[in-house]
Image (tube, helix red, strand yellow):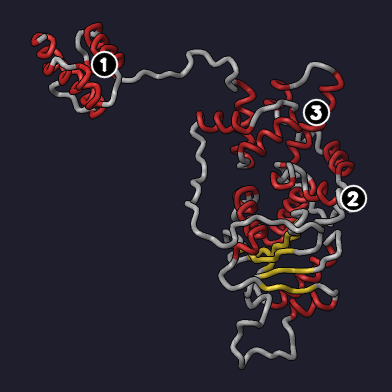
Amino acid sequence: MNTLYTQIYDSAKYLHNNKLKSKINCILRGLKTSNVRLSCQQFGISRRTYYYWLNKLKENDFDPNSLMPKSRAPKRSPRIIEGRLKEEILNLRKEFRYGPATIAWYMDHLFGIKVSPHGVYKVLLRENVPFRKRRSDKPNPHKRRYSLNTPGEGLQVDIKYVPFKVEGEKAYVYNAIDDCSRWRFAYLYRYINTYSSKDFAKRLIKAAPFTIKSVQTDNDVAFTNHFLPKSLDNESMPHPFTDILEQTDVSHKLIPPGAKELNGKVERSHKTDMEEFFWKIPTNITFDNLQNELSNWIHDYNHNRPHSELGMKSPVQKLSNYGFQINSTKRKLKKRNEEYRLNNPPRPSIVQNILPSSKNDRKNFLEMALIYSELSKPLPPLCNFCGNTT
């Protein structure tokens, strides 16, 4: 027994791994005291584990590294996502920065391939695709989620700055989103002032496919005079933004100062714009071209982009549930796809590698793949509501 103790002690003399040191100390304690039961109680293991470690050392010439835990991952994973399917998932992530749930939806509706969001997540994790770190939950009185029941019952309006200078100057985007259907309207301006707010209110009322009953904003001077000094605040003359709304019987609500969570839906739309739109725009773009690109993006947001909060439906599909018949752009997309067929064919990786074998499935697949390829290319500017070219 002393020889066994000496051999184990000498082999682990210069060991630096704390976990292995603990296992060796447990074995040495049992050998030194000749009381394995007491040693197991002190280190919190079973006698079976003790003798398993001791036999492992004997089988491997007392090498302490033989006690390192081995991987329990299966040697074969027949259902793992590999090949062209993995490449298409990575392409969707790289080109559009979609999350696992949205990528799984596109794989099902565009290619007819059912992949679970967790499966997509595992693919991105294995490829070391970076994910955004979640912020720690802080106490917040406005964490409860809500949604109004009628389109137009409440719209949230806010202003978002363009993350780069346009023609050497700052630019700003006025955003409005419907609380019920998530229908959006946005317009680009060079300045934040009462004239821009007044013009945006007129455009919003004209573009909305429903009757607007209420608009909610923060307390910015572009929307209200409430926090102006008394010497500058004239109660007999309402703010131009409020005046335009009241002319069409639309009420104007203000959120409490510092409670931007009450405008959470429009704030979240700003984040979506940053993740899926602005990062693709070249910084040397002109103001008019950025206006057109923004119009195309809002049109795609309303008509094509799935929303997880709406059950992976688009805002236009949500509005159709309430009886709002909005002119869809499927025919126009198809017509433009035929015009762009020669200049902008579908990506070879999609058509050649995942193309169905049957003739009917092939035809449907080509149409969906063509629409998919169209989403990543700039189209002629469209009206946010009716879909006509401007």
Q: Which residue is mark 3?
A: 366
Q: Is residue 188 visible?
A: no
Pick whichever of labels 1 and 3 is earlier in the sequence. Answer: 1
Q: Which residue is mark 2?
A: 327
Quadrant of the rendering where the C terminus is positioned: bottom right
Under circle 2, the secondary element is loop
Quadrant of the rendering where the N terminus is positioned: top left
Query: In which quarter of the view is residue 306 placed?
Result: top right
Question: Please, what is the three-letter code of the amino acid marked with disc 2?
Answer: Asn
Query: In which quarter of the view is residue 49 placed?
Result: top left
Q: Which residue is mark 1?
A: 50
Q: Is residue 309 visible?
A: yes
Question: Please, what is the three-letter code of the amino acid marked with disc 1?
Answer: Tyr
Q: Residue at x 50, y 59 (%)?
A: 139
Question: Please, what is the three-letter code of the amino acid marked with disc 3?
Answer: Leu
Within 10 Å of disc 1 (Cα), the crowding (few <14, some 14-19, many 20+) is many
Q: Residue at x 82, y 66 (%)?
A: 212
- Between circles 3 and 2, the one closer to the viewer is 2
Under circle 1, the secondary element is helix
Query: In which quarter of the view is residue 260 placed?
Result: bottom right
Q: Would residue 253 be found to the left or right of residue 39 on screen?
A: right
Pick whichever of labels 3 and 2 is earlier in the sequence. Answer: 2
- Place of residue 74 in the rendered image (x, y in percent of width and height, measured from the top left): 48, 16
- Place of residue 16 in the rendered image (x, y in percent of width and height, measured from the top left): 20, 28
Within 10 Å of disc 3 (Cα), the crowding (few <14, some 14-19, many 20+) is some
- Place of residue 43 in the rendered image (x, y in percent of width and height, measured from the top left): 24, 26
